[in-house]
Image: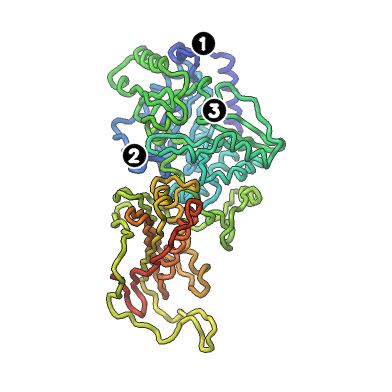
Amino acid sequence: MGSRQELSRRRQFLREHAAPFSAFLTDSFGRQHSYLRISLTEKCNLRCQYCMPEEGVPLTPKADLLTTEEILTLARLFVKEGIDKIRLTGGEPLIRPDVVDIVARLHQLEGLRTIGITTNGINLARLLPQLQKAGLSAINISLDTLVPAKFEFIVRRKGFHKVMEGIHKAIELGYSPVKVNCVVMRGLNEDELLDFVALTEGLPLDVRFIEYMPFDGNRWNFKKMVSYKEMLDTLRQQWPELEKLPEEESSTAKAFKIPGFRGQVSFITSMSEHFCGTCNRLRITADGNLKVCLFGNSEVSLRDHLRAGASEEELRRVIGAAVGRKKRQHAGMFSIAQMKNRPMILIEFLLLLQDSPPAIPSIFSQDPFCVQGIRHRVSFSNQKATLWEGGWFPRTPLLAQWRLRSSCPQRHYSSHLDSDANPKCLSAVAQAPATPSGPLPTADQLTHVDTEGRAAMVDVGGKPDTERVAVASAVVLLGSVAFKLVQENQLKKGDALAVAQLAGVQAAKLTSQLIPLCHHVALSHVQVWLELDATRHAVGIRASCRARGPTGVEMEALTAVAVAALTVYDMCKAVSRDIVLGEIKLLSKTGGQRGDFQRT
């Protein structure tokens, strides 16, 4: 508590001894810029599906990034001119080795009232005690879902429980409120609004719902944006007593509170109701460029001027000229979507939006304590006390992650994790009649019935463990209308290929629960591909499963392609019911007493 009291006394002193505001940081519309965001790195320890363009982000060479001394030199100049709040961003700022030292040295700057950080939370619990001692006074944690499996799908990494641990650590150390940033995207997480708000009942959180914003490479789609008013209506249906709080000067957020709740909720309405008229923010990118507007594509390199030996006065003139050119407001959501701008990962970490956000199948809403079947959704709020008290959270099996391959001209989804592999894209064209590559021994009777004809599970206890691999395929004939919508990713439900791929992976893992007499198999690998075939207006699907054990995995592969095909149908049925699912077949299997099989 001593650190918190010291920060409070420091702020009171600075309020009483405030210096006149600098003309260099005042634009032509009279807006005084007192808030600076500094990106410490372009790197991140997560790989969010929507965090960078499909083709990836070329990172700036280390020599072209700001050094620690350059960051502090610029910060010192800005604070001298009137900046009283600095927020450190990324990439992920907490992966920078000297982040604690940077905070400590910023804390020494006379006139700086607030030092904040925006983080994905992975390293927060470990570093926060040191950061607080160094002078960190505000924390924003980015989190888009409260479902562990969905978290892993989104970020392609484990870490949900580390983020939650970080939130608890911030509360434990006295930060109030702890701000949680949630980018809301239709088809991805808008069904969790109430669950996020419910957390504020017993915790000092400010849950900030952020409208989905366009940046270079994220293929922003207006249909995917959930507006502030729509979100507010959803909340008011559950909590009619929700009341609006007074807006702070220059705040980007519209704040609300439910009477009796410890925390609050806010909406950042960058798209539907901009707040340009009171904007007081400037940004410095990791490579040293000054951005006067998050959505603007105009930048000036302070790094180049520093390294050319510019004096403080020369830097002031450069900064003042850039601030003076700041426009009255940004171009509006539809114009912004057409503008060339950096991907958000290269500006700062806000939770950024790559590729149209996929809809998530109901498998994510399985019972978080014990998988007992699939249901529509489970209210996190009903379990929040159990989940949050003591820092314990439900563990959900890791979902195999998907990747959009760029090696083929068609849209093509694969769940394969090996970035070095480059499998040939699945072709869904008609194939010649299949024949086994060699004789396949067959049993002289059905193996899943006993001597009296009753269903029975095969006893595999005496069979040796061998490496088992199976590959299966299926085709979904969509018709021209549905095919075009899938191809252009314009279905109202979301991204059919992404959802179907994920459903196939999950189905493979649940095969023994779906097919009564199948043994449970501990799969070591599941891979699902989907590719569009324009000649047939079809989606080709292929799945590969691998395990080591006494029984084969062909049922897992067949279940994966069948459920993926059913998911494509479900995603497209509102457009057309003239959809045909077919050609579900085993392509190959290896391992086991009956020998290998290869369809040619």
Q: Amino acid at mark 3?
A: Glu
Q: Identify the residue position indicated by label 2 in the image.
A: 57
Residue at 47% x, 60% y: name it: 566
Quarter occupied by the N terminus: top right
Of labels 2 and 3, the one closer to you? 3
Of labels 3 and 1, the one closer to you? 3
Image colouring: rainbow
Q: Kindly report the distance in space between the C-alpha atoms of the residues bearing marks 3 and 1.
A: 31 Å
For label 2, the crowd category at 10 Å Cα-Cα, with few meaning under 14, some 14 to 19 and many 20 or more, is some
Q: Identify the residue position indicated by label 1 in the image.
A: 20
Query: Mark 3 or 1 closer to N-term?
Result: 1
Q: How many marks?
A: 3
Q: Kindly report the distance in space between the C-alpha atoms of the residues bearing marks 2 and 1.
A: 41 Å
Q: Kindly report the distance in space between the C-alpha atoms of the residues bearing marks 2 and 3.
A: 30 Å
- Give whichever of 279, 179 is nearer the camera: 279
* Residue 157: % across, % down: 44, 50
Residue at 37% x, 23% y: name it: 298
Q: Identify the residue position indicated by label 3 in the image.
A: 273
**Residue 243 drawn above or below residue 489:** above
> At numbered mark 1, what does the secondary structure look like: helix, strand or loop?
loop
* Residue 181: % across, % down: 53, 37
